[in-house]
Image (cartoon, rainbow, N blue to C red):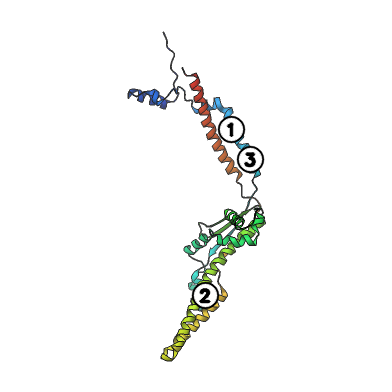
Amino acid sequence: MGTQAEQHPSTDLYLYSRYIYRVSGLDTELVFPSIHFMPDLFQLLQRRGRFLVVILIGSWLVTASVLWLMPPLYKSESTSVASSVVASDPARLFNPQIQHLYSPLGSSDQLDLLVGSGKLDTVYRPLVRRFNLIDHYSIAGDGQKTFQKAVNKLKKRSEVYKSDQGELKVRVWDQDPVFAAAMANALTAQLDSLHRDLLNRQNQETWSALQRASLRLEALRDSMSGDYAHQQGVYRQLIDQYALLLEQQPPAIHILDPATVSVSPDKPEWILILVAATAVALLVGLLIALWMERRTDYAVAP
């Protein structure tokens, strides 16, 4: 009298696993609870192909609808390099014979300082006021919280980073391509202004210290020998040099390529988003299809 053959998965891995557990004396039903059927991918696509197609088409429609509602953003980018701090050394400015020994380009550390400044709200606040970004971004309300929202949105739509070539890159995205270019150039100028002010403040402190030293030396004039004239002459020369340096205020950034108006939007990235949505939809669809197959297997299992 024949017996009905027990249905097993078609995969060798499953059969081999059950054999190992059976030989070892373990209860296979505890390890493989009532799973009598595990379809391979080809069989799954044959039975649930239409379902997967519906999932894919649905994900494309939803993704396309969301992307269609998102405003296009245009990107503008400026390229600069950091200026050398030693380029503003008085010894270089007032001695033409050694000027060629100084590089106009700053070090990697100076570039890192500029990039780090791109994370500070201090850099963005003047731009919010100058370009009236509260109205431009259509932010409702007034007061400090509204102003901070505009600052945060500008920071979110901006990027300050160091390129692989050691350049300072400043990017700004906006719905208006002309506005994006203006903002990128303004942000670059703001970074330059911030670091120029820092350097100018250091020079101002040095100039003030030299002035105080000269006055102290003047008070000791009667008690000093012939050294007074020489030392006072050195002080006066340095004071004049730093005074000229304060007047010139050398730049902290050399702009290589200012931001220009973009002709096509940069965001949203339709192709990348659609590919990601397709991958997610396939994964979710396959998991649901496997769950449906398992429920079907439970229903027909003896």
Q: Nearest the camera: 86 or 34?
A: 34
Mark 2 vs 3, N-terminal side: 3
Q: Secondary structure at mark 3?
A: helix
The reply to whether residue 81 is in sight is yes
Point out residue 169 in the picture as x, y percentages from the top left corner: 55, 58
- The answer to whether residue 201 is left or right of residue 225 is right
Q: Nearer the viewer, mark 2 or mark 3?
A: 2
Per the model, the C-alpha gap separating discs 1 and 3 is: 14 Å
Q: Is residue 92 above or below residue 8?
A: below
The location of residue 228, given as percent across then percent down, is 44, 88
Q: Quadrant of the N terminus?
A: top left
Q: Secondary structure at mark 2?
A: helix
Please report whichever mark, 2 or 1, sits nearer to the chain's N-terminal start.
1
Q: Disc 2 residue type?
A: Gln
Give x and y (percent) for residue 119.
53, 58
Circles 2, 3 touching at the beta carbon (< 8 Å):
no
Give amino acid for label 3: Ala
User: Would you name the residue on which mark 1 appears?
Assistant: 55
Q: Which mark is residue 64?
A: 3
For label 2, the residue is 204
Packing grade of label 1 (10 A; few <14, some 14-19, many >=20) is some
Amino acid beneath label 1: Ile
Query: In this view of the protein, can residue 259 be seen by the observer?
Result: no
Considering only vertical position in the picture, is 121 above or below 274? below
On residue 276, the disc is none
